[in-house]
Image (tube, rainbow, N blue to C red):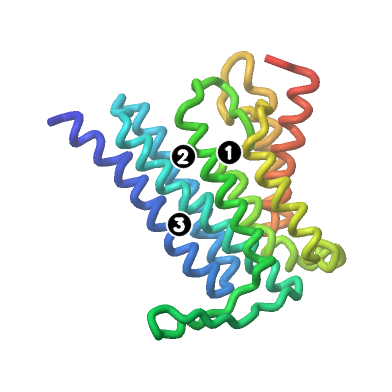
Amino acid sequence: MQNSIKKIIPNTLTSLNFLSGCIAAYLAFNHFYLATLFFCFLGVFFDFFDGFFAKLFKVEDQFGKHFDSLSDIITSGFVPGIIMYQLFILSGVKENNYVISIFENNLVFSIAPIGLIGFLISLGAAFRLANFNVIKKSNSFIGLPAPANSLLIVSLPVFLDYPLINQIKPYILKPYSLIIITFISILLMNIKWKMFKIIFTKNTYFYPFIFILSSIILIFFLKEASITIIIINYLLLSLVKNIFNRD
């Protein structure tokens, strides 16, 4: 009975992650990019704390693990796929009208075939989340966590609208640039590359400390546009750690 009560907290947080992802998906389809980033960030926040409380209360189980992954596939898989599709549209890719006849009924819809490449990010996130459930847990992530990748992609429209970034916006909003970003995103999530966790122990405090300090500075100067740079900074710090410290 006591364990059942304790499970309510992490499962409730996982449910909030799922609902945040659903809201973020709706907002992304309707071009509310800053609001999408907010709810995506909220989902990542709930995702972190559902695992934290599950470990704290020692109620980790198969249901919680799979429910967590199902929620993440919305917030960290489907939503960034939508955002990348929308970025293709912003790059000038046109949506075409299609009519398919099914049992004497016409199915009419508009879609940009090239933009569908963006949903490969969703597929890459699904592979990442499935692998995460079966690999042995360690003090490092193997590949970029799906939530971090989601924030990287979902923050791009906000980042590109920041005044100081406008100069590079025309180069990023090109179909070939977005295709490259899509495949880099998939690679980063599934590459066998150690990336540090934000934990503080005797031997693992340096990189988390540098990351948190630099993130605070970036948020102070760039506000909501800082998220993209923060994730890139995390990747660079992980690269440096892999070069100089292979533990």
Q: Which residue is mark 3?
A: 21
Residue 143, above or below 78? above
Mark linked to residue 4: none
Q: Give the left or right position of residue 137, taking residue 152 as reference.
A: left
Residue 194, above or below 74? above
Residue name at image x 41 percent, y 48 percent: 71
Q: CA distance from mark 2 to mark 1?
A: 11 Å
Residue name at image x 53 percent, y 58 percent: 79
Residue name at image x 43 percent, y 57 percent: 20
Q: Is residue 31 visible?
A: yes
Q: Secondary structure at mark 3?
A: helix
Residue 10, percent from left and from top: 32, 39
Q: Is residue 217 visible?
A: no
Amino acid on which disc 2 is placed? Phe
Q: Give the left or right position of residue 200, taking residue 188 as reference.
A: left
Sequence-wise, the earlier of marks 3 and 1 is 3
Q: Residues within 10 Å of mark 1 (few under 14, many from 20)?
A: some
Q: Give the left or right position of residue 64, taking residue 158 as reference.
A: left
Q: Quadrant of residue 223?
A: bottom right
Q: Secondary structure at mark 2?
A: helix
Amino acid on which disc 3 is placed? Gly
Q: CA distance from mark 3 to mark 2?
A: 14 Å
Residue name at image x 53 percent, y 51 percent: 77
Q: Quadrant of residue 208?
A: top right
Q: Which residue is mark 2?
A: 48
Q: Residues within 10 Å of mark 2 (few under 14, many from 20)?
A: some
Q: CA distance from mark 3 to mark 1?
A: 16 Å
